[in-house]
Image (cartoon, grey):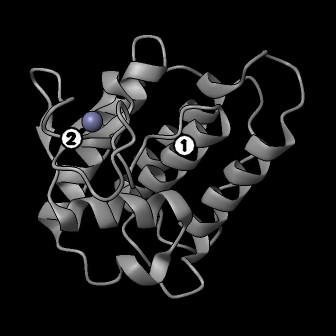
Amino acid sequence: MSQPTTCWFKLPLGAPWTYALFTASQVILEGANRLLPVDGEPAPGLYRLLLGALATLESGTPLGPRPAAMISDSFLLRALAWAGYAPSLTSCAQCDRPGGQPYFAPAAGGAVCKTCRPSGAATLDAVTQAYLLALATGDWAATDTVSESVQRKAGGMIAAYAAWHTEQGLRSLPYLERD
Ligand SMILES: [Zn+2]
């Protein structure tokens, strides 16, 4: 697992430190490290996202606790957007056709229409699309009742998308516990 050059994270004292929290924090730290454009140069926007994600892991969202993997998925989407790789979620990434689209393809830039979808594109249903959008915008209220299967499906899409935009993907992602 790649080591961040600087570790800002203090383990919460007294809080139960679970495997899910640990793996999610590793994904967040590795994601931040890999999306830094120039190693060693300040990136205050990314740093704020990183601190926010770690604080949310430790203390929950303003609307209550959420699964650790949901928090790291949200961080990855927002950190990718910060780095200029926001996936298209409200229109076709290729032809700009507005609205939710039925397919998702990392290489194409996110959601794509039937005409633009490359071979191997995953199907994207409206519920998963709305959930991805909620994660990308930090709309925790909209994540409250999302089923585990939708969380898993979206998590797989985010992992594939992050892999496409980071060399070799994130090594910590396969260890992420989705509970
Ligand atoms: Zn299209």
Residue topped by disc 2: 113
Can you give x and y, in whole percent of width and height, for residue 108 in the image? 33, 25
In this rendering, does residue 171 appear at all? no
Pick the front one: 46 or 101: 101
Residue at 15 percent across and 49 percent down: it is: 102
Can you give x and y, in whole percent of width and height, for residue 144 in the image? 34, 83
Name the mark on residue 44. none
Quadrant of residue 4 within the rendered picture: top right
Can you give x and y, in whole percent of width and height, for residue 2 in the image? 54, 19
Residue 152 position (above or below residue 126): above
Q: Select label 1 or label 2 by which is in front.
A: 2
Q: Secondary structure at mark 1?
A: helix
In this rendering, does residue 82 appear at all? yes
State left or right for residue 121 relative to residue 94: left
Q: Residues within 10 Å of mark 1 (few under 14, many from 20)?
A: many
Outermost residue, top side: 167
Q: Secondary structure at mark 2?
A: loop
Can you give x and y, in whole percent of width and height, for residue 99 in the image? 32, 59
Gap between marks 1 and 2 measured at Cα: 30 Å
Residue 75 position (above or below residue 161): below
Name the mark on residue 28. 1
State left or right for residue 88 relative to residue 25: left
Three-letter amino acid code at disc 2?
Cys
Quadrant into which the C terminus falls: bottom left
Residue at 47 percent across and 22 percent down: it is: 165
Three-letter amino acid code at disc 1?
Ile
**Dot 2 beta carbon under 8 Å from ligand 1:** yes
